[in-house]
Every structure is written in C-alpha cells, then in structure tokens.
Image (spheres, rainbow, N blue to C red):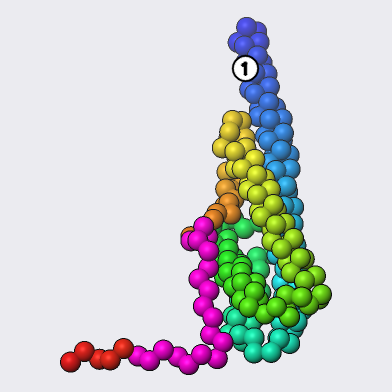
Amino acid sequence: MKKFAIGCAVLAVIGLFVLLLIVVGGMSYNRLVKYSQGVDKQWAQVQNVYQRRADLIPNLVATVSGAANFEKSTLVEITQARASVGKVQLGPNAPTDPAQLAQFERAQGQLSSALSRLLVVVERYPDLKANANFLSLQAQLEGTENRISVERGRFNEAVQTYDTAIKSFPDLLYAGWLGFKDKPYFTATAGAEKPPQVQFNFGAPPAAPAPAKP
C-alpha cells in the first residue's frame, strides 16, 4: 500500500509537471504568435510605403520628361531602378533570410539614390521647379521618404521585441521546437551617410581620353 501511494504521488508530480509545461508552452506559443504577427503587420506597412513611392515615380518621370533638354540618363536610371525593385518583392510575411532582406534593401537603396540625383538635377531647371504638378509630386515624394524612414524604424522595433522574446526564458524553451526563428533587421546601406555624387551632362561633349603613355 505504501509503495502504491508513493507511486501515485510520483505520477501526480509528473502529471502536474507535464501540465505546467503544456500551460507555459501554450502561453509562450500565443505570445510568440502575437509578436510574429506584429512583425508581419509592420513589414506589410513598410511595403505599403515603398509601393506608394513606386506609384509616384511614373507621374514624376512623365512630368520631368516634358522639360526641354532634361538629362535623360537620370530618367533612365530611375526607370531601371524601379523595375529592379519590382523583381525582389518578398510577399506579405517578413523575411527570415537576411540575404533576402539585404537584396530588397539594395534595390530600394538604388532607387533612393536615383531619386536624390533627380531632385538635385532639377535645380538646374527653374521652369520645372515652378511647375505646380512637379511641386505636388515632389512634396508627396518627400513625405513618402519620411514615412519610409518611420516605418522601417517601427519594423525594427517589432523585430527587436520578437527576437528578444524567442531568446528569453521561458519562451526560448519552446521557440525552436515550435518553429520560431530569428527575423533580420533593416540596416543602414553601406555609404548611405554620404550624399550621392551628381554629374551634369547637359549635351557637353565627352572628355577626351588621356594620351597613351609611350
């Protein structure tokens, strides 16, 4: 009888331990799902503001194209950069592969650089700077760029909350088993702190090549 009572007590302890694991695991799962969904939601918002920028570009290019003798190479660069961005869309869920996010960042960074050069080149065209349609598009574009910065920051905050959770007790006990993995951050593009180099080629003949050394 005594052994039976001890056995029942042991089974009860094991049962309570298993129940505790299930309860804590369920709580961890729900918490990690919430944080993961928060990252995906913010990623969708990041893509939304990037898409808004992409939607503005055709009208911007069409408006600028009307300016006499405008530097066409800048417009070609923007069009090509926009096309490149369209090839690396990553879908509604936040990327889990840092290489994928880096590819997305590079494409968006090239487009940002091209747009910056366009706005600097426009300074050489007083009539274009006074064009009401261009001024409206420029204001919308500048507002969108600010929004992109804000949403990227919020995305990184959501990723930080999620990544911290999967590495903290008790969630770290269940994260790997339940399939929750690290999500990458947006990072500053190399050289982003430097202003883009702007060259004006308004019909000027190309520079003569340097004479070959004997």
- Residue 135 within the segment the image draws in magenta: no
Residue placed furthest toward the left: 214
Determine the secondary structure under disc 1: helix
Q: Amino acid at mark 1?
A: Val
> Looking at this view, is 35 or 78 the one in front?
78
> Looking at this view, is 93 or 115 the one in front?
115
Residue placed furthest toward the top: 2
> Looking at this view, is 62 or 135 the one in front?
135
Residue 89 locus on image (x, y percent): 66, 68
Identity of the residue drawn at 72% across and 33% down: 27
Identity of the residue drawn at 56% across and 87% down: 202
The answer to whether residue 125 of the structure is visible from this angle is yes
**What are the residue bounds of the magenta stretch?**
191-209
Image: 143 above or below 126: above
Which quadrant is the N terminus positioned in? top right
Quadrant of the rendered structure where residue 51 is?
Answer: bottom right
Left or right: 164 with respect to 61?
left
Image: 56 above or below 164: below
Mark 1 closeness class: few <14, some 14–19, many ≥20 residues within 10 Å: few
Q: Main secondary structure of the magenta part?
A: loop
Query: For mark 1, what is the residue?
Result: 10
Residue 166 locus on image (x, y percent): 60, 39
> Looking at this view, is 19 or 99 the one in front?
99
Image: 34 above or below 88: above
Which quadrant is the C terminus positioned in? bottom left
Quadrant of the rendered structure where residue 75 is?
Answer: bottom right
Image: 190 above or below 78: above
Identity of the residue drawn at 80% across and 70% down: 136
Identity of the residue drawn at 82% across and 75% down: 132
